[in-house]
Image (tube, rainbow, N blue to C red):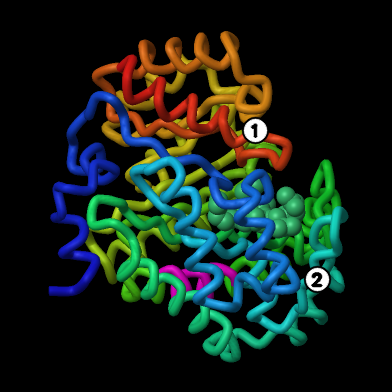
Amino acid sequence: MAPNARASLNTRRRFLAPFAGQAVNPPPIWLMRQAGRYLPEYRATRDEAGSFLALCYRPELAAEVTLQPIRRYGFDAAILFADILIVPDALGQEVRFETGEGPRLDPITDEMALSRLEPSGTEAKFGLICETVQRLRQDLPEETALIGFCGAPWTVATYMVGGRGSPDQADARAWAYRDPDGFQKLIDILVEVSIDYLSGQVKAGADALQIFDSWAGSLPDNEFARWVIDPTRHMVDALKARHPGVPIIGFPRGAGASTAEFVTATGVEGVSCDTSMPLCAMRELAELDIVVQGNLDPLLLVAGGDALDRRIDETLAAMKGRRHIFNLGHGIVPQTPPENVARLVERIRSVA
Ligand code: CP3
């Protein structure tokens, strides 16, 4: 039996129960960016690697930082340690992470520049990431699910075109308006390589996949349909054909009122909601026969105390009886006190 088929039948992995149609109480928990700078042991391993990207490409160290939050908190799922910008890096558009400044790439701003990309040359770098997945499947506790991931084509394109993060994704939006056919070629390349990349992660042992579309919210509805929904649907269709039974979670951050359409049109089995999604809207999304993940404000994990406890309780009460996975609405921030994460896990597991 393929490793993924065995894993998805593994009822010991509570994380997978909601995808099999079961609402579990308390809900499974994991947190976006659960491995990262808020943990001293992460900072030590990152220093050992020398840089963030070097850490991503050293399977034994990447596996180690993936395991660190599992050891501390016993989350129900581990997420592969890598980054959404591995894809452009593997395509030959070299990515640099400068300390305190975020990612930098030499921007690709028109169709001509697409010739710089080498979709057939991704194997070595993807291979290293898949080796991390393989190690993890060996080293993780049997009851912990393993989530593979990549960035959605639209969000990855915003970094490739802008050359860095930006508040409004103006460069990618402008290209998409100016020359939709040219921009489509970039999106098509990303769809194809991302399918192969995620498929490789499943073959290496990932139990579920998440597609991060962090900048989905910057597009008006017709553009959202073309650059967020369509590419995601293509990926979901291809992955379902290759790996039926491996759940896919979409994270169309900021999609707001378009979230339900995203869910029904893409065929994802789960949707991760950002912090601005009202709890009553999350409950409604759960009626679409999917798993809903989210959506605590990461800053509540910085604040801690009563404010944190109250919102945990409200979230649990709102989602009780639904197929819910507890998570944040966005990634853990570096200034988070690790003891607040422990408090969160304890409260969810005791109150629910
Ligand atoms: O624990 C996990 O969640 C798994 C690993 C993971 C990372 N990035 C590690 C990381 C995942 C799933 C991501 C996703 C990611 N990366 C997204 C989508 C989710 C989101 O946050 O919206 C995006 C947009 C990126 C791109 C990216 N990577 C940026 C903009 C930055 C710089 C900002 C920052 O926090 O430093 C990164 C770096 C990054 N990716 C770090 C980590 C742990 C910090 C790097 C360091 O150690 O200095």
> Residue 1, relative to residue 101: is it above or below?
below
Examine the rendering and report whether any part of residue 223 can be seen. no
Q: Is residue 299 above or below residue 314?
A: below
Q: Give how far across and how far down residue 103 sits, in percent.
A: 80, 61
Closer to the observer: label 1 or label 2? Answer: 1
- Mark 2 belongs to which amino acid? Arg
Relative image position of residue 200 (x, y in whole percent): 40, 76
> Which numbered dot is residue 233?
none
Count residues near mark 2 (Cα–Cα under 10 Å), then give few for <14, some for 14-19, many for 20+: some
Residue 24 as seen in the image, left or right of residue 307: left
Is residue 194 shown in magenta?
Answer: yes
Residue that mark 1 sits on = 337
Q: Which residues are magenta?
A: 190-198
Instruction: Look at mark 2 in the image and give the residue it sits on.
Output: 96
Most common SS among magenta residues: helix
Q: Point out the quarter of the image occupied by ligand 1.
A: bottom right
| Quarter of the image with the C terminus in it | top left
Residue 344, horizontal then vertical, whole percent = 48, 26
The amino acid type of the residue labelled 1 equals Pro
